[in-house]
């Protein structure tokens, strides 16, 4: 009986201790702050929700907090997307803070924050976190949301990464500019027949180029783009527009400005006003080109202008290329150009499998009768993602994997035969044991 009373007293003491601890915990929580409501893009969002998002999406976040039994001072709310590799440089996209605030006991207050899923963020799972803390309390409130990040929407699938003008954004009238437009597919599927148009609308001049296909997360460059500024245009500033068309109806544009200076050679007439028949030929081409191993090659444009009044035949050739690439002129290495007109010849270069990465020098030569022009070009060879050759080895990775698969299949077949053989022997032994007669 005495033991029962002691036991009851012990149980009562434990209940009292647990009650005090619970009251204490409740007091600690209500003395600080609670998140009472969260909305993301207008929809209620509970802690732990899974959100489907696409690259480029915006988060309009509204957080409502409630103070506990005591006043709250110098508190701050932070929202951020975790796991972005360029967060250090693009902090404004993936992180947002409120100003510090005070809140009287039992009062509520709402705050707005804004984040953006970067277009360069990988397609993966990541966390959106909302953190509430003040300057002194050890308590930190954290809400976590699981983000399922997918590619950009169809209309935003192409991103212009670079729009480069060479040799300079200041050009003399009558000369040509070379353009390089680098694009990336940040969408969810492969894109076919991606086309770029570079134009100077005020001068009514333009050039086109098409890439057959761009895979998801692949970057490619349009480089066969040359525009000749007419000789007699007024000096001034002009807009150059790069317009990339994709997915049949979608497009993205970027605009830069060029400064055109007056031509030093006049507008193609002499002092008497007659046509210039000096017979000069003008050749314009980029001074460098990028070649990526493992690809179908790169197009190098050569613009030829016949400034004479009669037709001329031009022969174009490339020397010093055979060591690192195959070369082919399109439509032909021989071209006939009428007086006062211009044409573009395209040199297609395909890097060889054994070409070493780095800068290579070759020359492009143009011959027309007694006239000869030679230009030195630097080709930079890089290793692409599709290049299946190991560094330091001539054995393709694909071949190694194929052999490894064959060996694995052989090993599995041998193991299967061994298992069958063991099973058959065990069955034979069981049959022999059953056939024996015991007395």
Image (cartoon, rainbow, N blue to C red):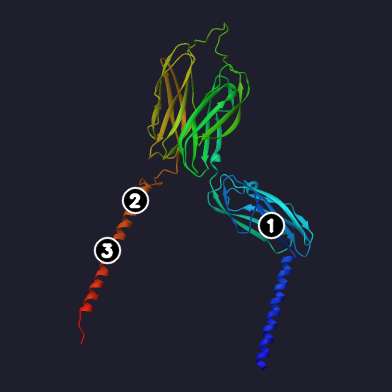
The residue beneath circle 3 is 417
Alpha carbon distance from label 3 to label 2: 23 Å
Q: Secondary structure at mark 1?
A: strand
Q: Does residue 287 lie above or below 230 as drawn?
A: below
Q: Does residue 392 lie above or below 142 as drawn?
A: above
Instruction: Answer few, some or many: residues within 10 Å of disc 3's Cα (few below 14, many 20 plus, some between 14 and 19).
Output: few
**Taking the image as drawn, is residue 300 in sight?**
yes
Residue found at x 71% / y 76%? 19
Measured as percent of width and height from the top left, residue 155 is found at 55, 39
**Taking the image as drawn, is residue 225 in sight?**
no
Q: Is residue 370 left or right of residue 77?
A: left
Q: Secondary structure at mark 2?
A: helix
In the image, farthest residue toward the bottom: 1
Q: Is residue 64 left or right of residue 51?
A: right
Q: Is residue 207 left or right of residue 414?
A: right
User: Of marks 1 and 3, which one's residue comes earlier in the chain?
Assistant: 1
Residue found at x 56% / y 34%? 163
Depth order, front residue of 194/350: 194
Using the rendered view, name the quadrant where residue 130 is placed: bottom right
Say which mark, if any, is on residue 402: 2
Alpha carbon distance from label 2 to label 1: 56 Å
Q: Quadrant of the C terminus?
A: bottom left
Say which mark, if any, is on residue 37: 1
């Amino acid at each position: 009986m005495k033991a029962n009373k002691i036991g009851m007293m012990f149980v009562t003491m434990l209940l009292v201790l647990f009650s005090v601890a619970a009251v204490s915990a409740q007091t600690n929580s209500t003395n600080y702050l609670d998140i009472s409501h969260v909305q993301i893009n207008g929809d209620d969002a509970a802690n732990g929700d899974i959100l489907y998002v696409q690259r480029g999406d915006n988060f309009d976040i509204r957080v409502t907090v409630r103070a506990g039994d005591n006043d709250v001072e110098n508190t701050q709310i932070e929202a951020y997307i975790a796991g972005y590799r360029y967060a250090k440089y693009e902090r404004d996209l993936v992180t947002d803070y409120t100003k510090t605030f005070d809140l009287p006991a039992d009062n509520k207050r709402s705050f707005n924050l804004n984040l953006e899923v970067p277009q360069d963020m990988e397609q993966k799972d990541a966390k959106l976190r909302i953190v509430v803390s003040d300057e002194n309390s050890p308590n930190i409130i954290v809400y976590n949301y699981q983000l399922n990040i997918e590619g950009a929407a169809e209309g935003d699938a192409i991103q212009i990464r670079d729009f480069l003008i060479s040799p300079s954004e200041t050009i003399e009238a009558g000369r040509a500019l070379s353009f390089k437009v680098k694009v990336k597919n940040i969408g969810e599927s492969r894109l076919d027949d991606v086309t770029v148009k570079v134009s100077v609308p005020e001068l009514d001049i333009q050039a086109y180029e098409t890439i057959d296909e761009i895979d998801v997360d692949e970057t490619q460059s349009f480089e066969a783009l040359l525009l000749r500024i007419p000789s007699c245009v007024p000096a001034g500033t002009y807009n150059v527009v790069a317009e990339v068309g994709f997915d049949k109806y979608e497009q993205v544009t970027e605009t830069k400005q060029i400064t055109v200076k007056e031509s030093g050679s006049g507008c193609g007439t002499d002092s008497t006003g007659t046509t210039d028949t000096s017979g000069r030929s003008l050749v314009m081409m980029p001074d460098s080109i990028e070649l990526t191993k493992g690809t179908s090659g790169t197009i190098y444009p050569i613009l030829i202008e016949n400034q004479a009044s009669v037709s001329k035949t031009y022969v174009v050739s490339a020397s010093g290329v055979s060591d690192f690439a195959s070369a082919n002129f399109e439509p032909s290495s021989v071209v006939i150009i009428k007086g006062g007109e211009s044409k573009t010849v395209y040199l297609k270069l395909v890097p060889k499998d054994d070409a070493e990465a780095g800068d290579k020098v070759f020359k492009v030569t143009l011959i027309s009768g007694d006239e000869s022009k030679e230009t030195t070009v630097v080709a930079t060879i890089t290793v692409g993602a599709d290049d299946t050759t190991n560094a330091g080895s001539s054995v393709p990775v694909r071949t190694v994997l194929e052999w490894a698969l064959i060996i694995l299949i052989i090993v599995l077949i041998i193991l299967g035969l061994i298992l069958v053989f063991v099973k058959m022997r065990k069955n034979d032994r069981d049959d022999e044991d059953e056939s024996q007669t015991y007395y």
